[in-house]
Image (spheres, rainbow, N blue to C red):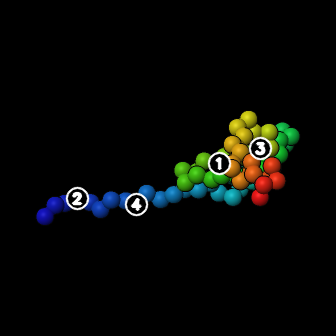
Amino acid sequence: MTDAAPRNKIRLRYAPKSAISRAVEAVRANGIDVVSVTMGGDGSIKLSATDDKMQLRETLFDTLDREGRL
């Protein structure tokens, strides 16, 4: 028999609602519109704004819709 201790499960620690609210309010106070909030299991918070430099690539659906071929 081995005396190995059982492994502790890794628990996700999302940021509390109060921390998310403070982050959103701080960004809004600087005149930036928050579009979405992404929370990581390690407690990280990512806020996306309307003037993000990284734009999503246009999909085939978007192209066909713009050309009126749908």
Task: Give the answer, above or below, for where 44 lies relative to 13.
Answer: above
Which residue is outermost to the bottom? 1
As measured in the structure, the alpha-carbon distance from the residue carrying label 2 to the one carrying label 4 is: 15 Å
Left/right placement of residue 30 relative to residue 59 reads right
User: In the image as oriented, which residue stretches furthest toward the left?
Assistant: 1
49 or 12: nearer the eye? Answer: 49
Comparing labels 3 and 4, the label whose residue is closer to the camera: 3
Q: Earlier in the sequence, mark 3 or mark 4?
A: 4
For the question of whether residue 24 can be seen, the reply is no
Question: The disc labelled 3 sits on which kind of residue?
Answer: Ala
Q: CA distance from mark 3 to mark 2?
A: 49 Å
- Image spot of residue 39 (x, y percent): 63, 53
Badge 3 local density, few (<14 within 10 Å), some, or many (20+)?
Answer: some
Residue ID for mark 2 = 4
**Mark-to-mark CA distance, 4 and 1:** 23 Å
Q: What amino acid type is highlighted by mark number 4?
A: Lys
Per the image, the residue denoted by label 1 is: 45
Marks 2/1: CA–CA distance: 36 Å
Question: Label 2: few (<14), some or many (≥20) within 10 Å?
Answer: few
10 is higher (above) or lower (below) than 51: below
Disc 4: CA contacts within 10 A as few (<14), some (14-19) or many (>=20): few
Real-space Cα separation, disc 3 to disc 1, in angstroms: 13 Å
Residue underneath mark 4: 9
Please, what is the three-letter code of the amino acid marked with disc 2?
Ala
Mark positioned earlier in the residue sequence (2 or 1): 2
| Residue 49 visible in the shown view | yes
Helix or strand or loop: what does disc 4 sit on? loop
Dots 3, 2 in contact, CB < 8 A = no
Vertical arrangement, residue 3 with respect to residue 31, above or below = below
Earlier residue among tags 4 and 1? 4
| Label 3: which secondary element | strand
Disc assigned to residue 49: 3
